[in-house]
Amino acid sequence: MSSEPNSFDRPDDVAPSSPSPRVIARALVVAAALAAVGIGVGVLLVGVVAFGLSVAGVSITPLLSIVLSLALATGVGFGGVALAYLRYRGHGVGYVGLALPSLRDVAFVVAGYVASFGLLILASVVLTTTETETAPNTVAETGAQNPEILLFLIPASFLLIGPGEELLYRGVIQNRLGEALPAPAAIVLASMLFASIHYFSLAGAPRARLVSISVLVLPTLVFGTAYELTDNIAVPALIHGAYNATLFSLLYLTLRFAGTSQLPEAAALLPV
């Protein structure tokens, strides 16, 4: 049972105006710990299940590997850690603001989707102009080698990736930071934490990975801002899902009709 008071659901109305350094430090440590535990639990679950399947004689194909990663790491790992933390704090779903999107929320989804791609295009132009190397996304690389996987990843973006990642990073981590910090700071820090975990889903030199991570912060800032303005976790989950699904669709169409094995540069900037 939590030792912290449960006097609210959404923290926005009670965030301290002048939090002490101790309160801020605690929020930062908790946020970082939640991100680390989410990754750790996901990796552990995938490893245990993959080992069990191998022992049982089941071949781990690329498609099965992706399914395990999404279902166990993103769904059970991220989502499970988020729900466990909410239970520990004594909060219900009201803390993350889960509700059916209103017309206003739908407008934010559309605006957020457009803004995310606007930032992606801008970043791609800058990277191309400066000839800056980015690190390929291993999920996108696997999809490029096995295009049928991309067809699975399109609906998974809405059903697993968007909801699981947004529940943890916006619904829990951003909210927890918002209890001690102004909303803009909470959005930026949650976005940086979210982008940084993608270091492990990127390939290539450390410098190229850091470039990709820096760019990945851009769409996640949109996700966090949309969440802050709507107080509905469904909004960033839908934006995130639509953003990923569009990139997976474009990658599939490029491979299917252009017949190229080259990954589009945007595929390196997938927040998955």
Image (tube, helix red, strand yellow):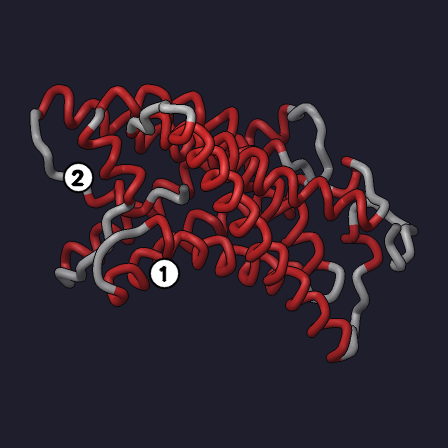
Q: Which label is found at residue 186?
A: none
Q: Residues within 10 Å of mark 2 (few under 14, many from 20)?
A: some
* Number of marks drawn: 2
Asked whether, in this view, residue 203 is left or right of residue 185, the answer is: left
Q: Is residue 168 above or below residue 252?
A: below
Kindly report the distance in space between the C-alpha atoms of the residues bearing marks 1 and 2.
Answer: 19 Å
User: Considering the image in quadrants, where does the C terminus appear?
Assistant: top left
* Percent of width and height locating residue 261: 10, 34
Disc 2, SS: loop
Q: Which label is found at residue 214?
A: 1
Instruction: Give the labeled residue for mark 2.
Output: 263
Residue type for callout 1: Ser
* Percent of width and height locating residue 49: 48, 33
Q: Can residue 111 be seen in this view?
A: no
Quarter of image, res 129: bottom left
Foreground mark, 1 or 2, reads 2
Q: Residues within 10 Å of mark 1 (few under 14, many from 20)?
A: some
Q: Is residue 240 visible?
A: yes
Q: Residue at x 46, y 32 (%)?
A: 52
Q: Residue at x 30, y 24 (%)?
A: 149
Asked whether, in this view, residue 153 is left or right of residue 104, the answer is: left
Q: Residue at x 81, y 66 (%)?
A: 16
Residue type for callout 2: Leu
